[in-house]
Image: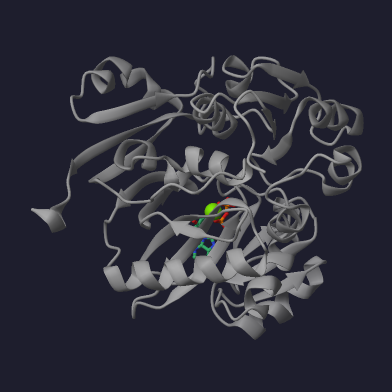
């Protein structure tokens, strides 16, 4: 049964992704309840109700579930067990299983390789003294990452034969980790795709992504993504969605090797920063698509009407407001964050141009 207008969608997490989900949900007459430790978080400014408390607090999760007809999440570091306990009869989309796979880099890579999806070569690392052997095994430069809680390049260290292993392991907090072979990629790309409750799949066009200091800087569509790469990425995303019996939007990040092969870097069980351009270049944004999926509505067409470049506004970038808002062919989106700290995502702007392939 699709969710009726007037129903409430609960979101665990009240950041900018929750905010944009709430704004999309409002267009269908849905109400939004958000759980976040910060009462002034970006999503609370546009939500009907904010439950203020920690994400892993069972009482807070229970309160969210009791207010909601369906629950979703906007980040993957949600503690799964308290969430499962709290939900009762309230459905969760994407499922707790999708959350478990994507919140641990070792589980994620083992899952991907197990369904035939290629990734960088990797080894699980529990202690600093395992690094030397694993590095020899993988050969060449590597990246050490925490298994859990990493984002925007945090919790990562470069490793080569010259590295002092104990220092590197301490630098990431001496926690269970993964050692990944460094991929000499030609460029990075991602695909944002959705699967509905009845199993239908719709993928937006992939974006070419450029990161700066581990944080996404720009997503360009189509950028360097050829039609053949787009098709291959869409097929990989569809395989992942089907194997997870997934409901909602997923972000799949890829490395493209110099000979055009695709390796999956990571998956995000939620709307994704590299899909923000959809609000400017498609009839239905990734946020509407996620709302449609979790609400049991039919998916929207992912057709793209423009070429575009999405630029993240990080820290002081947001000071360019007057110039950005004056641009005639761009869509500006700010997240309502009071303080423009260094490295903090404050908003984004998407600049559109007519599709070159239809000129
Ligand atoms: P996060 O969860 O912080 O996004 P990622 O694993 O996606 O972590 O790493 C962030 C960025 O670091 C990637 O987008 C890529 O630019 C670079 N990176 C990560 N892993 C590798 C790798 N194995 N080889 C080359 N570059 C990598
Ligand atoms: Mg990433």
Q: Residue at x 54, y 14 (%)?
A: 338
In the picture as drawn, the residue positioned furthest to the front comes out as 1
Q: Residue at x 51, y 46 (%)?
A: 272
From the viewer's perspective, is residue 14 above or below residue 272? above
In the picture as drawn, the residue positioned furthest to the left comes out as 359
Q: Report x, y in % for residue 91.
A: 77, 44
| Left or right: 202 in relation to 133 | left
Quarter placement of the N terminus: top right
Q: In which of the image's four quarters is ligand 2 placed? A: bottom right
Image quadrant in which you'd find residue 131:
bottom right
Viewer-nearest residue: 300 or 223: 300
Residue 310 visible in this rendered orientation of the protein: yes
Q: Report x, y in % for residue 299.
A: 49, 49
**How is colour applied across the structure in the image?**
one colour
Viewer-nearest residue: 92 or 137: 92
The count of marks equals 0
Q: Residue at x 63, y 31 (%)?
A: 4
Q: Report x, y in % for residue 143.
A: 59, 65
Residue 183 visible in this rendered orientation of the protein: no
Viewer-nearest residue: 225 or 202: 202
Q: Residue at x 82, y 44 (%)?
A: 79
Image quadrant in which you'd find residue 120:
bottom right
């Amino acid at each position: 049964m699709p969710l009726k207008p007037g129903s409430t969608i609960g979101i665990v997490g009240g950041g900018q992704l929750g905010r944009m989900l709430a704004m999309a949900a409002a267009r269908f007459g849905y109400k939004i309840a958000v759980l976040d430790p910060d009462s002034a978080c970006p999503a609370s400014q546009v939500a009907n109700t904010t439950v203020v408390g920690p994400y892993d607090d069972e009482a807070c999760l229970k309160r969210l579930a009791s207010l909601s007809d369906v629950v979703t999440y906007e980040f993957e570091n949600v503690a799964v067990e308290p969430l499962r306990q709290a939900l009762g009869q309230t459905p969760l989309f994407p499922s707790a299983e999708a959350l478990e796979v994507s919140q641990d880099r070792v589980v994620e890579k083992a899952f991907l390789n197990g369904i035939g999806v290629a990734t960088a070569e990797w080894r699980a690392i529990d202690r600093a003294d395992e690094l030397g052997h694993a590095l020899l095994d993988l050969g060449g430069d590597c990246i050490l990452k925490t298994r859990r809680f990493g984002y925007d390049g945090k919790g990562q260290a470069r490793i080569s034969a010259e590295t002092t292993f104990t220092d590197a392991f301490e630098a990431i907090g001496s926690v269970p980790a993964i050692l990944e072979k460094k991929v000499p990629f030609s460029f990075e790309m991602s695909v944002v795709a959705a699967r509905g409750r009845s199993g239908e799949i719709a993928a937006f066009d992939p974006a070419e992504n450029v990161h700066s200091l581990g944080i996404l800087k720009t997503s360009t569509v189509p950028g360097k993504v050829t039609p053949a790469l787009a098709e291959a990425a869409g097929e990989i995303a569809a395989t992942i969605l089907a194997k997870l019996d997934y409901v909602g939007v997923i972000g799949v990040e890829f490395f493209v090797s110099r000979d055009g092969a695709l390796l999956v870097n990571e998956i995000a069980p939620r709307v994704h920063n590299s899909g923000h351009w959809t609000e400017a270049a498609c009839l239905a944004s990734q946020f509407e698509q996620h709302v449609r999926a979790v609400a049991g509505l039919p998916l929207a067409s992912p057709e793209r009407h423009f070429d575009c470049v999405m630029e993240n506004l990080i820290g002081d970038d947001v000071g360019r407001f007057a110039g950005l808002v004056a641009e005639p062919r761009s869509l500006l989106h700010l997240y309502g964050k009071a303080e423009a700290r260094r490295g903090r995502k404050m908003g984004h702007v998407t600049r559109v141009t007519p599709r070159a392939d239809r000129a």
